[in-house]
Image (spheres, coloured by chain):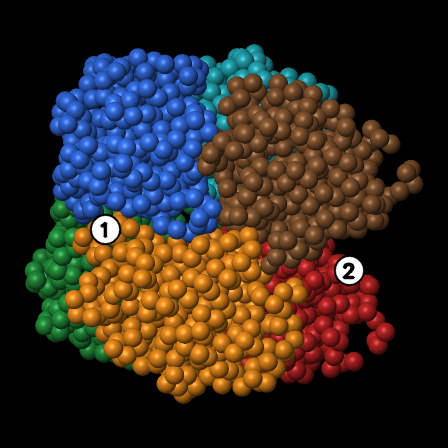
Chain colours: A blue, B green, C cyan, D red, E orange, F brown
Amino acid sequence: MSERELFQPLSGNEMPRFGGPATFMRLPAMEASEGLDVAFVGVPLDIGTSNRPGARLAPRQIRDESRMLRPYNMATRAAPFDSLRIADAGDVAINTFDLGKSIGIIERHYDALLATGCTPLTMGGDHTIALPILRAMRRKYGPVGLVHVDAHADVNDEMFGEKIAHGTPFRRAVEEGLLDPKRIIQIGIRGTMSDASDVDFANANGIRQVRIEELMARGPDDVMAEAREIAGSEPIYVSFDIDGIDPSFAPGTGTPEIGGFTTFQAQQMVRHLMGLDIAGCDLVEVSPPFDSAGMTAWIGASMMFELLCPLAASIQAET
Amino acid sequence: MSERELFQPLSGNEMPRFGGPATFMRLPAMEASEGLDVAFVGVPLDIGTSNRPGARLAPRQIRDESRMLRPYNMATRAAPFDSLRIADAGDVAINTFDLGKSIGIIERHYDALLATGCTPLTMGGDHTIALPILRAMRRKYGPVGLVHVDAHADVNDEMFGEKIAHGTPFRRAVEEGLLDPKRIIQIGIRGTMSDASDVDFANANGIRQVRIEELMARGPDDVMAEAREIAGSEPIYVSFDIDGIDPSFAPGTGTPEIGGFTTFQAQQMVRHLMGLDIAGCDLVEVSPPFDSAGMTAWIGASMMFELLCPLAASIQAET
Amino acid sequence: MSERELFQPLSGNEMPRFGGPATFMRLPAMEASEGLDVAFVGVPLDIGTSNRPGARLAPRQIRDESRMLRPYNMATRAAPFDSLRIADAGDVAINTFDLGKSIGIIERHYDALLATGCTPLTMGGDHTIALPILRAMRRKYGPVGLVHVDAHADVNDEMFGEKIAHGTPFRRAVEEGLLDPKRIIQIGIRGTMSDASDVDFANANGIRQVRIEELMARGPDDVMAEAREIAGSEPIYVSFDIDGIDPSFAPGTGTPEIGGFTTFQAQQMVRHLMGLDIAGCDLVEVSPPFDSAGMTAWIGASMMFELLCPLAASIQAET
Amino acid sequence: MSERELFQPLSGNEMPRFGGPATFMRLPAMEASEGLDVAFVGVPLDIGTSNRPGARLAPRQIRDESRMLRPYNMATRAAPFDSLRIADAGDVAINTFDLGKSIGIIERHYDALLATGCTPLTMGGDHTIALPILRAMRRKYGPVGLVHVDAHADVNDEMFGEKIAHGTPFRRAVEEGLLDPKRIIQIGIRGTMSDASDVDFANANGIRQVRIEELMARGPDDVMAEAREIAGSEPIYVSFDIDGIDPSFAPGTGTPEIGGFTTFQAQQMVRHLMGLDIAGCDLVEVSPPFDSAGMTAWIGASMMFELLCPLAASIQAET
Amino acid sequence: MSERELFQPLSGNEMPRFGGPATFMRLPAMEASEGLDVAFVGVPLDIGTSNRPGARLAPRQIRDESRMLRPYNMATRAAPFDSLRIADAGDVAINTFDLGKSIGIIERHYDALLATGCTPLTMGGDHTIALPILRAMRRKYGPVGLVHVDAHADVNDEMFGEKIAHGTPFRRAVEEGLLDPKRIIQIGIRGTMSDASDVDFANANGIRQVRIEELMARGPDDVMAEAREIAGSEPIYVSFDIDGIDPSFAPGTGTPEIGGFTTFQAQQMVRHLMGLDIAGCDLVEVSPPFDSAGMTAWIGASMMFELLCPLAASIQAET
Amino acid sequence: MSERELFQPLSGNEMPRFGGPATFMRLPAMEASEGLDVAFVGVPLDIGTSNRPGARLAPRQIRDESRMLRPYNMATRAAPFDSLRIADAGDVAINTFDLGKSIGIIERHYDALLATGCTPLTMGGDHTIALPILRAMRRKYGPVGLVHVDAHADVNDEMFGEKIAHGTPFRRAVEEGLLDPKRIIQIGIRGTMSDASDVDFANANGIRQVRIEELMARGPDDVMAEAREIAGSEPIYVSFDIDGIDPSFAPGTGTPEIGGFTTFQAQQMVRHLMGLDIAGCDLVEVSPPFDSAGMTAWIGASMMFELLCPLAASIQAET
């Protein structure tokens, strides 16, 4: 790996932060097949949303706001760009008029990307995109574990009679054997519901749900210790829905739920992923039309970087 | 028709304008089948959009802003509520995850509505909805004429390989024989294009396109005199895309094009429809997430009322 | 009560959440006199405000945002719609030009509503509306207790020489014998003041004030245990001013004060009301023109639902 | 008058435009009684509004935006500060809880101001304030003429049963003999109405109403030539409602009506007032909470300066 | 030139418009030295502004909004991408802390770019950037003519004692012999001023100024016929300040002036440049923080494309 | 000092809060030389910012929002206006085109102000302004201690090659001997970095940095006890960067960092300054163009008042 060119985010001392390419962290734009260890990928799909749309605009907005990120994580001393080849691999060309076709496009895109040996860090788009990504993951890794941070469990059986939508991906993923339900933990669940079927499904399948009340009472450190137990040493996928964070921080999302956790707590949770075997991550449901001064997209960008740190460590551990 | 109860919009002297039901003009909520002459109908569909979404939120926002409308059109002396039974017939329950299914749902909804003898005045939603409405119109009236005000001709053959999307409805409608192409006029067309195929399609089918430069040079009165000629005395459908109006007036839309006409010109154009045989109207593509202080929705509400006036006259002329 | 029709909020599987009637939780619009157990009522009055206006627009905006609420409270397992007849009873037609007349209109409206046996859950409007509601409450129940969550004690003697304004209702209510001062607790008080007269009035009348510093130090559970002691087993009124919640969550209000509590804490507080004898509730001071992406109104809607749960339990306990 | 100190607006070369005092045009703050020829006065009242409030915030916002104004009118070569003593006389301390008392406060304030020989240029506030100002005007000048630019005639008899509100001032003013109805012209009238009573009142009293359609057809020059005829050589009052201007320019107002005139046309109209005997002017109904980036307030500030030019000429002509 | 690769903007049928690279029109990112005929260049400088800042953010925002542009100009039938090699050459790395140094950086950047034979189409940044660009232009072409569309003449001698700022570039350019003053036309001038020095400077140097009143009276066609006369057949530079357009269209700018022209008129003016010898263009003073829903940036992007069309024709005419 | 006139903020009972002068807390506008004990001073400079500008607009916006502040601090019982002569001393006339010259202007302004015996409480402006203020402080007091609340340490050596910018003031201040590094504490530090040089500089100079993780773990009370130890009994300067507070509370700033502390914690920290010898305070980096409904400016105003309380106590202790 020694002679490969590594990329540092474009520094504010070379180009003012408000200029330069609007790629993630102002990294080079590059295909996964060009020897990348990690690729930032956008999936601008929002036709799986049930309330407020707009997540289609998130990859562009998150990239724009990511200009303020510097390469060194002061809290954990992680410096992922110093040892891995990381770039922005652009967007998946989803079909915005047909959800079923888009699912297929995303699957094929991730199959090809994973075949290069690159690990994806995905910017949604709505949460529907987790299903095709997990299908590709499963073809490479077999069933994976899941650390899922969200206000919603997203294990509905159907929405408006449809099996595929942004409220159903994890039920489908369990049914299709993409996930090992015993290695699933869902953190931050809250809000009103139509009935108790989410809880029933989780209970029936051995999925661990940590409601917000429990998270608030125990704190992120304790909950994440349990999450690490559940995740174990096999590959996991990390799915971070921005609506897990309270809407006072992240109003730019489609189905906000009040009474959520803070960005500080979100950072603590992600930092506790260090050492796990992370096969991929996503950050979903940022909706710029409902954002205020780019702050939700900025949280999205910041959390993408936080996710990169344990993900990069996971890759380095393998090599 | 004499003993039927007619409805006046709730007056600001009975309930302050900022209170009362959030129906269109604070009219009663009622089914078309309850003897309505005209029904305001919402179709909250926006999964046919190719750029900025949000038109799903338009029916609610237009209704909210319509609270400021009073029942008497001072410019034309029209008083539609004095002789017709007009109410708000609610929304069509589209399937927001599947465009094809939604098309079917809308068709069936309008078939049923038209069967009651009621004339619909529709709030979109994106422009895709014109296709299923025109299919229902055709089953009742045969091919109809079209007065189409818009920045875009919406006669693409395909978008991203799809035959049905918000840029294709009028090509489909011509192909399916829903519209009589010789009785189509499209007004306000402008903006950049991928090629000249819109113009070619119009020319090949005898559709009259009035580009913005011609509209600005001749003025609304002269253009509408021609439109009345083209429309003739047979039934027509009127489709008003809010993006025909310049985005300085109506920023809350998905594919704005600069260099448009004013709301004053829009009002003049609609007022010239008086005396035509209008089988139905729609106002589409208002997108509240990109609006400013409700002004695009307010234009939408105001233009809905302007459309009601010649539509009501058309109904009265028949009875 | 068995054969009465109960109403469930319109489900997102019947009508997309962005469509359907803009009533509270998309419930039927109905008069209290039609056998309702609980009525959601809007009082769109804001001429009692001393700084930023706009609360007149709150009932419409809260209703719009309430579309995202589902009927089942996952945190407490409450399902109020399963056993009570609950609907949206519309707005009080206040006189927006005359505060005194509006007070009279509200009083008469609540007298009539309470006479039907229905319990009101009110959306303000500014806090002035608590006075006429409490006058009606008193005629039915005698002096009631008060759980009052707010940044301000609202016990000014006068504002600009006026006895009735949004900063005075609870002093008037105590003076008029509407409230039993020994059964009043005010929680969340903070901000600058002109002098110590608020504290003096509270002390002189035996009113318990819990300042924000105490709330933060003790936590909501402990403070609410005390609140339950103070409230006792007799009827209480619950008045929830949105500005009690920190403006980072709820910027859409007229007199924000920094350093407030979170929505999670607000939910905890309201959930501790379960088991008390609640004669009525209000949620006031949401001001949509200063809101961001509807988030304050969404908090308002969510808290209305949280208030409904113990209120419904209180009604069920009686029957 | 020769030795009096005159005031120039603070120059951008002395203090950057974004700094300095937030008075109108960064003029000195001064009492009318200190020998002023012209006083800018704010009347932050908005409890006369029937739809969207917020005009109470206009004087502060207009003053803030006025920082960009330079003292020389390039279009007309007017330089009012070179020969008159002009300053910012602050706000009238209205009672925001009681419209009737506020009317009295305003009357007394303008009586005192006019007694000093100073001419007021008023920033509203809603249009209700024209009534008490005209009462004071009448006591000094007898009945005056009126050039009234607005989307609404504001000659309702009542609103919600009230005689005094922002839709009634000019009917009251005619009834009370404050205005000479033969010397009234109302320009820009449009929008829906409840009935034809506005027109009837105007006709019955000899008031000239120029609807928007006429203004657009004839143009500002021709209409203003007529206005000058009507105004004659006796004192007139000029009342400029920002909602006369189209809401694409001026969205920050309470009762916008589409299809209005442009700011360029507004400037042309005001410039044609040069040479008339102007006893006072107001600019009303700017509502900052509904504005976008201060543009409506900026129009308000710019039009205040345009109004100052003919008003100053009128004063100079007398001396 | 035949075998060179030409670039088409990424089509909406290959990648949804809300995805793909955030370059101008989703063109390739490329250095001018890579054989480009035309380069889109961003200069994110705003420390020359005297009122509202924010133009530093314009290049990114204009690029983002340009995603909606298609390659074919329907009004003029221009298809610049069919015969020229056009790409996005990124931003100039200005020094945001030192205006003088930034001037030098920009000069050197344009010297290098012009040396490659590429023609620049620049996105500002504030109007200060015209000076260093013109210095580079002069070194290549000698003194050039200027078509300058703007609300302000930008010929101040000093601002706050400084010779270089966004209100002075064209006086400096005349003094330094960068421009031939007899071949300068300034169109759209309006607003208040400190004195008549702008007019005096123009008169003294033979610069033609067309104030807004003249433009409105004569219309764009007539004024542009004169502009073509003045420009003649030698190289000209075109400088388009977005604040020339009325702020109802383009609120996102730093020193808006009311009473401006429309985007339709702006398009007409630029289209009349066809056939002139255009050495370079800029579009300046878009300020995203004061924009609404991206509409000013969208106008900026649309006008950039309009400018490209005559500029491309000029290049083609030479080859 | 007994016979001096003291000033109370204009009461809401004398003038509605939305009216009156837009000075800080509606205090008199007055020069420091007029015997003031404390002066509120604005420094509208933002050309030292590296990302989002706009802080130039902060002094006006903070003053506007400060209208809601009442004179009595209920939490601490402080009543600073009862014993000190406090007024608004206006803005420093910085040169917005030249950072170096502005530094000189600010130094001279503060030298003159401090010479009057008045203590300044400064509204920035960006953080660059701390350097010239500290230079003036040093000339009066010798090296001072520093309590610095911020997300960033602002001890960069250079930004884009410049020694003076908003990320460097405290390194310069240490190098120039303006601060005693042993008496510096920086609280709230977080976010990504380019390298560890901030930490290295702090360590090398004995500066105490409390990162956010430590602050969250220990709590404000414990950290501030340490801060008081470090500050000691000699004069200190207090610099409060609004971006220390989490952007959910204070989005209106130029370089927000997620994961910050709350306004409640900010208030607690400032209240613990009581009893220290405070020579001056600033509150910087509020950027109104990125704010939402004035809430960041309102926090700024509220924190200015909190800072005034211990500062006033410090002055009183000396006299």
Instruction: Using residue D289 as the reference point, say whether residue B31 is left or right of it.
Output: left
Q: Position of residue F107 (x, y in %)?
A: 72, 48
> Circle 2 — which element?
loop
- The chain letter under disc 1 is E
Label 2: how many Cα within 10 Å (few below 14, some 14–19, many 20+)? some
- Quadrant of the image for the N terminus of chain E? bottom left
Residue E96 higher or lower than F232, as above or below: below
Q: Toward which corner of the image does residue A124 lie, by quadrant? A: top left
Q: Toward which corner of the image does residue B118 lie, by quadrant? A: bottom left
Q: Position of residue D130 (x, y in %)?
A: 64, 63
Q: Residue furthest right?
A: F3
**Is residue B64 visible to the viewer in this orientation of the structure?**
yes
Q: Nearer the viewer, residue A193 or C144?
A: A193
Q: Position of residue B107 (x, y in %)?
A: 14, 50
Three-letter code, disc 2: Met
Residue at 40% in and 56% down: E91
